Image (cartoon, rainbow, N blue to C red):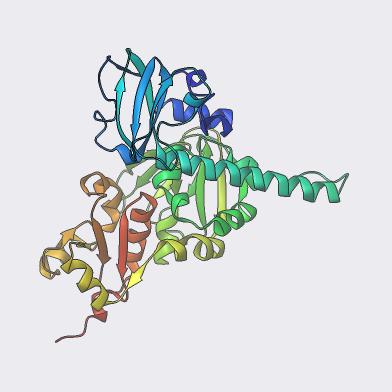
Amino acid sequence: MDASRIAHLEPVCLLSPERQKEIASLCFVEKVSKDIDPFRMNVVKNSQSLYLLTGNLAVHFVGGKKIVLRGGTDLARYPVGGGRMQVESARALTDIEIVRIDTDLLDIMMTWDQLAGYEQSVLSHDVSKTAGTPAARGAGSWMKQTGVFSAGNLQSGVFSRLPPANIDEMFRRMTSLPVKAGQVIILQGAEGDYYYLIESGIAVVTRITEPGATPVQLAELKAGDAFGEEALVSDNKRNATVTMKTDGVLLRLDKQDFIELLKEPLINAISWQQAEQKVATGAIWLDVRFPSEYKFDHLPNAINAPLHEIRSVLGTLDKNKTYITYCQTGRRSSAAAFILAQHGFDVFLLEGGTKSIKPD
């Protein structure tokens, strides 16, 4: 929908213009006929904010209060029942138009924009104290880049799981790296040194499966995608090559900063006893070893999702479930846990791997 249709709504109007356009792209105008309750059409009422755009709507609140809300009025700028009073029922007095906005996403965007504004003010204050020196690109300006920090990344990606202090410090330590088409960013078999975010451009991920074989393309990455984390988390060599398909700009974080700011907050390691308790209440074992290792010996009811294929099986996993990753030592499974956490999964790591399991 056109962003102008929601730009006056509260608190959407407080978002940056870029964020308003982004959230508008995720919404659409719904037409509701006279005498219909728009809330009864929404099976996930508490997860969405409903706004009246046009027409008249009678609203009955819990506790007995009733109002008639008219589209275009000052009161209609706010979500229906968005305050402390809960809506018991509603009825369209005329044909109406409404829009629903994901409440959680809106809150994340508000938090992000406010944090970006704070960072911008900090940078301005620092620059004012050092007048005449070139201004560095601050966290606030990076955070406003909706290509990299899209709604999806903020809601279920790596940034949704980081404490504000870590986000703040991460941007302070990141460097911007202009790159050219054809440039190799990471090489299969090399040591892991950096974590990368694509600010602009397209990159291709390839892997050589056996000596002398032609590289196999695994994925194409675009603005907002990240790469390079597997080797840093597992402390292994690079398992694929990433080459720029177009010119672009990467944001780069070195290994030590990555471990301090990203790996540790994202990976929740638990003991065997804690894992058993979680499995008893519905958690699922995720064996990230090779299929042959899994076939030889795996935990009861475990699912096999080999680390080198983890990205391709993400779509088969259920984000409503809890997963516990494991391997023999915890090294491979820590990398898998990080990737799953990046993509919004509720995931734990079996600390020490299966070697930590003591026989009964």
Residue that appears at 53% across and 66% down: 260
> In the rendered view, would you say 108 is above or below 335?
above
Tell me if I can see residue 210 in this picture. Answer: no
Q: Residue lying at the far right in this picture: please name it.
A: 132
Image location (x, y in percent) of residue 83: 45, 40
Q: Quadrant of the C terminus?
A: bottom left
At x 59%, y 43%, the residue is: 114
Question: Can you give x and y, in whole percent of width and height, for residue 336 in the image?
Answer: 32, 59
| Left-right relation of 202 to 256 | left
Q: Is residue 81 left or right of residue 359?
A: right
Give the camera-side residue of 228 and 121: 121
Point out residue 286 in the picture as x, y percentages from the top left corner: 22, 61
For the image, the number of numbered tags is 0
**Residue 113 showing in the rendered view:** yes
Q: Position of residue 311 (x, y in %)?
A: 30, 48
Looking at the image, residue 279 lies above or below residue 303: below
Q: Is residue 199 above or below residue 185?
A: above
In which quadrant of the rendered view does residue 357 lie? bottom left
Residue furthest out toward the bottom: 360
Q: Nearer the viewer, residue 218 or 338?
A: 338
Q: Quadrant of residue 180?
A: top right
Image quadrant in which you'd find residue 300: bottom left
205 lies left or right of 323: right
